[in-house]
Image (cartoon, rainbow, N blue to C red):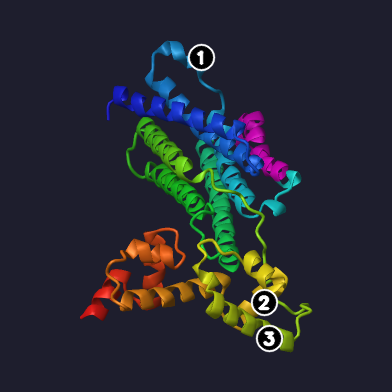
Amino acid sequence: MSEELLKIPYLFAIGQGILIAVSLLIQKSVSRKANYILAIFISAMILPLWQGFIQLGPAELLPLSIPHLFTFLPWLYGPLLYLYVALKCEPNSVSNNRIVLQLVYLIYPALFVTFFPFWSSLVGTENLISITWALIFTQMLVHIVLSINILRRYQTVLAENYSSTEKRDLQWLTNLVIGFCIIFALDMSIFYLKNFFDIDNGWYFHTFVFAESLYIFTIGLFSLRYRSAPSEQLVTPEIKYEKSSLNAQVASKLADSIQSLMAEEKLFLENDLTLQNLADRLNVTTHHLSQVINEHLNVSFYELINQRRIQHSKVLLKNGQTRFTILDIAHEVGFNNKTSFNNAFKKYTGMTPSQYRQSQAA
């Protein structure tokens, strides 16, 4: 790819990144702290693009380059991604002290710059650089794993609280982490491959920066679709209930009440039914309700509601009501869109709604 062509995506990504970062900073949101972290993360992604643009531009731009940029910057990506995911999924667990603590990773690059001549004299310049990048990649990998673990816990919490999850940032956060994983894998692979093959450092640098520009494009696209989703204070049920005040007799009666309410009033047809809504109807705490659903009905709240939705949809599909489209039936039984309905139907029946309708018509 020619240098002139590379300038175009670099400039476009820089402009888009600045717009996204500014909009995040001025956006009024309950998750303002998370927005600030994401704005810093995007800004950190923009800086290598600017450095790449300078390298491709005229010599007059060289004074605008940022010294020691790649000494400090790589240490920030992992912690910023981790903090953003944590603030979106577990906001109550992220204190200001926990955020400041992530800056401890900047101690090493500060020492690296300050004592570089001394350290390089001990182990050699090439060995020192290799050790440094190994530490950077390890730190990034640790934060990727931490972010994925938070997402898995968040998914469990969503299933315990909501009957519909597509409006609650999970896909956006998953895509953000996957995109970072791709860049991380690409960067690490090329970095170590160039030690075995004759790969030009300029080609390596611009491949990494071009991948970052694509990542910023993707953030821009998905932020338009998902960023406005609310960051909610989720009710997190306990995994164990040894200390619960709920006795077996009350729990059994509550389980019967849940089943009766679902059968008689068909609450599962409400498209955004939550654990809190159901607890209010039954006049119990969300903790006790979650315990009964988990231990006596042996499902999560999400499964309880969506199993009933699928059972009801099978009746509508089986009755040969062809005047209703699949989307009509999806909305009728409480799903917000056809994709969610198809996925849930296939999960519980092994076939799509269309396939099920055809099998009943045969």
Distance Cα–Cα, label 3 vs label 2? 13 Å
In the image, taking residue 194 as reference, residue 156 lies left or right, namely right
Q: Main secondary structure of the magenta part?
A: helix
Distance Cα–Cα, label 1 vs label 3? 75 Å
Q: Position of residue 329 (x, y in %)?
A: 37, 66
Which residue has dot 3 on it?
253
Mark 3 burial class by Cα count in 10 Å: few <14, some 14-19, many 20+: few
Q: Position of residue 156 (x, y in %)?
A: 57, 66
Q: Which amino acid type is shown beneath numbered disc 3?
A: Lys
Magenta region: 99-124
Which residue has dot 2 on it?
291
Residue at 67% from the left image edge and 44% from the top image edge = 102
Q: Nearer the viewer, mark 2 or mark 1?
A: 2
Which residue has dot 1 on it?
63
The secondary element bearing badge 3 is classed as helix
Q: How many marks?
A: 3
